[in-house]
Amino acid sequence: MFEPHPAAITPAPASHRRALEPVPAPPAAAAPSARELWLAAHFPRLPLDALLPGTGQGRAAAVTATDDPRRSIVACNERAARQGVAPGMSLNAALALVPGLRVEERRHPAEAALLDRLGRWALQFTPVVSLEPPSAVLAEVRGSLDLFGGVMALWRRALAGLSASGLQASLALAPTPRAALWLARADLAMTVTRADAMPGIAARLPLACLQWPQDTIATLQGLGIRNVADLLRLPRSGFAARFGPRLLDELDEGLGRRPMPRRRHVVPERFDERLELPVATELTAGLQPALEYLLGHLDAFLRARASGVGTLRVDLLHRGQAPTRLWVTLTRMAGDVEHLRELLRERLAQCRPAAPAEALRLRSGVLLPLTLRDAGLFERGRSADPEATARLLDRLRARLGHQAVFGVSPVPEHRPERAWRVAEPGGTAPVPLSWPASRPARPLWMLSEPQPLDGWEGALVTGPERIETGWWDGHDVRRDYYVALSRAGVRLWIFRERPPGQGWFLHGVFG
Amino acid sequence: MSDALAELLRHPALWRGSSAVAPRTVSTGFRLLDTRLPGGGWPLSTLIELLVPTAGVGEIRLLLPALRALATATPGEPRWIAWLAPPHLPYAPALADAGLDPARMLVIRPRAGLDGFWAMEQALRSGVCAAVLGWIGTAGDQALRRLKLAAEEGCTPGFLLRPSVHRAECSPAALRLALLARDYGLDVEILKSRGGGPARIERLPIH
């Protein structure tokens, strides 16, 4: 039957036009056939497992959503599930069912970290691993089937690994990543290896496995659609017009009519090497050559990758004892081992290992790309080269301790002892403008605590400057400050509490 | 023979009394003092020793104009002023009032012992400091020599503040001053200066 081109009748804005055009189904021949095989692992209880590992059997526990006023449950353990708690339930309902329920609030960073670890775990099967946040991992395993002895062997191995870790997981294998995700989310535990088998299975896939927005699912259910097979029977153009082309694309990805490019999960590189010592020693002089050796390797490692490190850890491994750990954290990332060597030598010289070390392990933090800069030929001593500053700070802190090196920063505050604070060198706020410009002079030295001046005799030069403030936070001061001259000729900043009577206090020296 | 001698005399480590080339200096900010110092100010890239009877007689106020000039003299990233083992904490609001950027102050508080020398040497040698002020009491000749060398290497003036009791000891510092507070001013006695003679300035008005 003739159907006029919709775009010809209604001149829609460009953004709408795509949805209104009839959407032809991509030819099945162009689809990636079963040349690929994707393993999907879905972790329905990931929010719980990330916070309370191994809580399958213990107390009933549940994790709630953070961005939800009802604090609805996102995951619960088996014990809670047996007593009727289910995801989606409000916290009040869950507590009514299980009064002793242990409740934790969902923490997304912990979940991301666990998913990242699971991604690393999946790398044992194939180098092509991709994360599907929030709770699934995908791995393309076609190429590794022979290595592991077939589909079933690989399946069993993956299952054994996951159940040993105590995580609740459902696995699925399918020719496309999207289909594998659907099957895993539906907990069908299926291995589909043929590219054309998906439409046949679609009737067993509930709408929930699509993880589409809640209102979309509700609309579809209102249309009497219960599973993916029903969905596939809908006219394509109507579907695209109503729900948007993106969801149609997802369906095509699931059926292999459209590729679903995946971003590979890449594990950040680190340097990690250990060296057995020929003789167990606790003398730092004996450890030095081994450290030099490992640093030589680190140097080559960093050079080959044009990278630098921000942190470094040295473990002295003892027999039957926890290792002695030395940390070096740099003010600025370094790509040059010479600087690291100097810092480590300093740390090693200060370290008193409890027992002889049998081996040495050198482990770097995450590698960071190094930006090369030209070293000026005549720049020395001309400006505070940030690189040279960072080196100086690192060196001083390695020997004197982190707290021994600091900067100072003014704070807009009338109480003299609170008008400054210790700051990271260079990280000082600009001088606040709220200070009165005509304020009487302040001393260049400040005592950490005002010191009582017993029986003090000297000349008052200027004053008083009355400072009476701070009543709102319980540390109020009521003082009269004077500039005074001691007998040795030192100009002092002294005060007397108001009302007078408690004697004089020394607070600063003009230097 | 004379060629060899001339060559020897060109050696930078050799110093021939008053005929030496005037050192590069920065004005002290006090005209009275500038006229008495060889080169007309504090020599750069060397060790300067200030002997004080007690901390706070006015040594910082004496150095302030020069510190201000040194900190802002160079283009690019401003350099640091390092305070090594100061007797009290430098007070940020007062520094800001005096025209020094508190963000460029670096306070180093080492434990007692040799760490102070070591830290001062590192700060001087790094070349990222406009000036290093160190409060170090007892010091051997060897240690002071090292500091002077580090100052030369890093092109950084190192101000060593020591109690007056060390006045009689010999010191490799290029400039040695003894300070004494008097009548709201400062008596400055030049004990030793490379390329100049001893001198005395009374009641230098420092404010």
Image (tube, coloured by chain):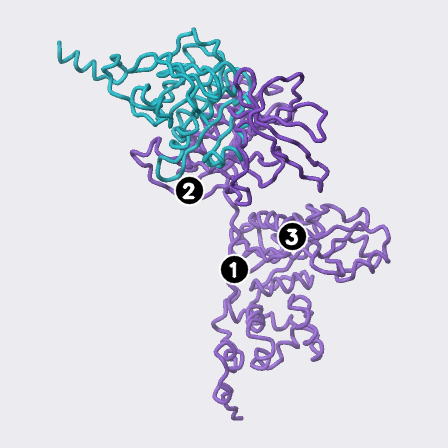
Amino acid on which disc 3 is placed? His
Q: Amino acid at mark 1?
A: Arg
Where is residue A124? Give x, y as percent.
56, 47
**Chain of the residue on which disc 1 is drawn:** A
**Chain that bears disc 2:** A
Which one is nearer the viewer's eye here, A231 or B202?
Answer: B202
Q: Earlier in the sequence, mark 1 or mark 3?
A: 3
- Disc 2 to disc 1, C-alpha distance: 28 Å
Task: Measure the alpha-carbon separation of dots 1 and 3.
Answer: 22 Å
Q: Residues within 10 Å of mark 3 (few under 14, many from 20)?
A: some
Q: Nearer the viewer, residue A49 or A387?
A: A387
Q: Which chain is purple?
A: A
Which is more foreground, mark 1 or mark 3?
Answer: 3
Question: What is the display colour for chain B?
Answer: cyan
Q: Residue furthest top?
A: B168
Task: Determine the chain carrying the residue at label 3.
Answer: A
Q: Residue at x 39, y 25 (%)?
A: B125
Extreme residue in the bottom direction: A1
Which quarter shows the N terminus of chain A? bottom right
Q: Residues within 10 Å of mark 2 (few under 14, many from 20)?
A: some
Residue at mark 3:
A108
Residue B148 horizontal side relative to residue A365, left or right: left
Instruction: State the residue position of label 1.
Output: A262
Amino acid type, residue under disc 2 in the picture: Leu
- In this rendering, do the residues under marks 1 and 3 share a single chain? yes
Residue bearing the label numbered 2: A370
Q: Residues within 10 Å of mark 1 (few under 14, many from 20)?
A: some
Q: Position of residue A439 (x, y in %)?
A: 54, 38
Using the rendered image, report if marks 2 and 1 lie on a common chain: yes
